[in-house]
Amino acid sequence: MKNTRSEKRVTITIDGKPYQAAEGRNLVDAAKEAGVFIPSLCYFKHLDPPLGTCRACTCKVNGRNVPACMQRVEEGMAVEVNTPELIDIRKALVEMMFAEGNHFCPSCVKSGNCDLQHMGYELGITHMRFPHLFRDRHTDYQSRRMVLENNRCIKCRRCVEEVFTDQGKRVFMYQNRGIETLVGIDHEQEALLTEAQAEAAMNLCPTGAIVVRGKRVAKPFGLRSFDQQSEQEDYGIRWSANGDRSPREKKMVATVSLAGCFGCHMSLLDIDEEILDLVDLVEFHKSPLTDIKRFTQRCDLGIVEGGCCNTENIETLREFRENCDILVAVGECAIWGGLPAMRNTIPLGECLEEAFINAQTNDEGEGRVPYHEDLPKLLNRVYACNEIVKIDYLIPGCPPSASHLWKVIRNILWGEEFSVLYHEFKYD
Amino acid sequence: MISPSTTFFRHEPRRNQLVNELWKAQQRDGHITEQTMEALSRDLDISLIEIQGVVSFYHFFHTRPTARHVIYLNNSIISKIKGYERIREALERETGSRFNTKDRTDTFALFETPCIGLSDQEPAALIDFHPFTNLNVMKVREIIAALKDGKEAADICDQPADHIRYLPPNNHTIFFRPYTAGEGLGRAMVLSPGEVIKIVKTSELSGRGGAFYPTWIKWDGCRKQKATPKYVVCNADEGEPGTFKDRVLLDREPGSVLEGMIIAGYAIGAKYGIIYLRAEYRWLLRKLEATIQQFYDQGLLGRAIRGNPDFDFDIRIQLGAGSYVCGEETALLESMEGKRGEPRTKWYFPVERGYLQKPTIINNVETFAAVARMMEMGINNYLNRGIPGSPGTKLISLSGDVRKPGIYEIEWGMTIAELLGHAGAEDPAYIQLSGPSGECVSMNQKHRRISMRDLLSTQDIRCGGSFMVLNRHRDIMTILLNFSEFFLKESCGICTPCRAGNYIIHKKLQKMANGLATQADVEEMRQWCHIMKETSRCGLGKTAYNTPLMAINEFSDYFSEKLEGAGNGMNLKFNMDEAISDYEKYKV
Ligand SMILES: Cc1cc2nc3c(=O)[nH]c(=O)nc-3n(C[C@H](O)[C@H](O)[C@H](O)COP(=O)(O)O)c2cc1C
Ligand code: SF4
Ligand code: SF4
Ligand code: SF4
């Protein structure tokens, strides 16, 4: 958008405070210039008309809820951004995108550079209020150069409106409608894109849905686009939890790894010499760390890693609920299923037959699905812990970092103050 | 002279013909083949994926082979209560086909489709797009036997009755007065365009498509636009389940609709009119085309209309292809341009940039008919009807558990109870006004007057044109699920809250229907519906869950029975046996 000096400046109010803004400027940009954060995913500065598909920028303008990207700045415009209701609505919309697609961040090339994931962090999303849909979505590997991963597409429409061949033909287009809507790729047109155009397509996609083969994000963890910096100056304050510090009496803690990888447990121990302080404060009861197998006393805190993929997980989880005052789900798997839930889009029978009967390492006709009364039984899908029992707190991350974990746990147990740092709050 | 038919105006780009071309190909081949799409892609110079995107949007387009006869059975709630299940079974039995597929001899293909605008004569079906009404098992047997015998659906179909059941007393009818083509137009054309719009303003006419937007504001806004050519679009998509008033108007008084469009053209300075007719009403096409031809013959369409050298006006018809959301005015524009019917954003309004990005007004069939009639009868006469604040009359499509389903032209101000009385409602308990996207009321509200007043009034209630009456034996959950399934299938999928929200909330309703929901679920549903309403791009998402929310308040006794006692907080609903049932199949 042009920023000429002849632009007329007008006064608008955002959350009651007056700001000067250029008349006619898109409200998303105007707010940004004023230092007010409005999340947006589909918005692209140069598109006229704006796409208006994701709705994540919904604000109240002159008393009506509208997407900010659909508003041009006008004199006297009264904008509400950070009311509790609006914050919740925007959060819900982004949660909906996570619930609708199949987002397994730890296994996604875009992780760390993904706008959707970043919005999740900015909005402090620890879990989805909506049930995960786990619909089997088409991944198109047919193009020579690109892979189209509809599991990760949020239907922002950027690719449809922006990616054209030199002959002016579209490469991407929506297919079907409603919940079945997906992005289709034209293989013939895709082949006509230059290398640079293909890469540009990958980059304009706010998620990891458009992938160019062989192109990976080369930056290591910690240096990726969204590893360190929040867009909101007050990020830390906004998500801080403060409490009254009660006397630090020693607490009894139990831990378990259900359908997880023990990564969260490893992380729990990854606090170097601080662990010595902790030994004075907490005692581990039933836990893989102590190898205590049965509950013999009530615990103050139960830490659960992993979701439930079999009957034993369910029984264990129920036992934890019965024996712990506070139950915390740690890590993506416990919160919503995580990587093990990748199987949720596929019927169990298909998974089992693929693994045990049709596996290439099997001799013809030799394979069979293990079944024995002593073996835990597999559930039809992987369940999140809070689908089975009530969970009091959720700590996202795959795994959550050690320092973050213990900060939260200290807060829960003794009411210690802490603030969540942007770089600690992660899904991968 | 441009021939009065579905052919395009000469200046319209070829790209816009896509939907028409697809129709042609499907009629020729029974489905849309890969070759057709590839040929169109070359011919229109657009990528194949774009064509596939359009084809997959509309539910009347098939990419797999269908059969010689294609049967669409209506699955709306009215059809359901009138014997849908029996007809469905009979169709499968007689044709030897199953739904969503075809029989082995490629003679019959069976599909379901949402409301086909024949709620007064359900169960009803379209066979090769010809209407078959008041179906029963015997009738199905005869129809299928005749088709097997080589008869054509066109020759044995029904001519749906208009069922005009009630006209206001004292000759107060507006829509069904004796009609002479050109009279209203004649009176309008002695006035200036500005004066015509002033009359429309005085009449307080507001959108009869259900949104009640003042008609004159649209017209005036469009008149002031500089860009040309301008367009007048008649929205004959009538997709709201339970609504069939536009069908009856088009069947009984097509001239008044055309005339309203021509008057609009005169008022805003447009040269072109387009009627967007839903594919379900294809059987009305011939009649409409004949009426258009008559108008050309009488000099009411074409060049220098009624001798005014500055006023040329042409009308053509555009056929839809199966999509409720295309009734939304901007989706309709997209569809007319041969694209996927996705509603546009509100960045530009149609009066600024509508069809082909030119100033366009879009009005409902009934709105146009009302304009033609008020011009002809005189505004004072028109204002004599109805109540203060709501002058005139309203067409209401009434269906369900009533003795006399059909069209009721009421003067604004009639109460719900009176209307139900006229219709012979049998033990009414649940009334759905304005279709699934409208409002539901119980008999506690029967004193309310039907008017165009504020939605929030407790004395009055708005009605966009349909009344579905259900008696106390009907299960409310079944009704709500029928509606929510409809929205789920008809969402265009472009914005997050409606695409995902419809699905998520539908699941919640199912949970409730299965008796597994708790008060907490109801609370969640309330919040989620609110989010959908406040953030969806178009009216579909904004209104889809009005009805369940109202129903929960209006029929609270019913719902409290449906709810489980709140769980004990620890073990939420989880059925282990069910969860391992897949695995148990491998038991040795
Ligand atoms: C999902 C949806 C479906 C609609 N379907 C119709 C329809 O079938 N017929 C109609 O006249 N208006 C329909 N409308 C309303 C139109 O958007 C528009 O308001 C109307 O055509 C304007 O004409 P009016 O002002 O004369 O009512 C629909 C709106 C929405 C949001
Ligand atoms: S990184 Fe982004 S696209 Fe990839 S799985 Fe996570 S949220 Fe989805
Ligand atoms: S593929 Fe990417 S750019 Fe295209 S709609 Fe999906 S999320 Fe948006
Ligand atoms: S509300 Fe629904 S129908 Fe309307 S634009 Fe959004 S997805 Fe499409």
Image (tube, rainbow, N blue to C red):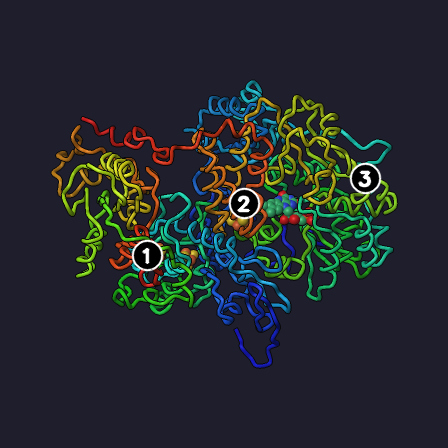
Q: Which residue is mark 1?
A: A416
At x 24% / y 48%, what residue is drawn?
A251
Q: Secondary structure at mark 2?
A: helix
The N terminus of chain B sits in image quarter: bottom right
**Residue A339 % position (x, y):** 27, 48
Of all chains, the one bearing label 3 is B
Left/right of residue A201 with respect to residue B361 in the rendered view: left
Cα distance between the residues tagged 1 and 2: 69 Å
Task: Indicate which disc, 2 or 3, sits on the residue closer to the N terminus.
Answer: 2
Which mark, by number, is residue B23?
2
Amino acid bearing label 3: Gly
Q: Residue at x 26, y 50 (%)?
A: A249
Q: Position of residue A328 (x, y in %)?
A: 30, 46
Regarding mark 1 in the picture, which secondary structure is present there?
Answer: loop
Residue B558, by quadrant, is: top right
Which residue was labeled with disc 3? B386
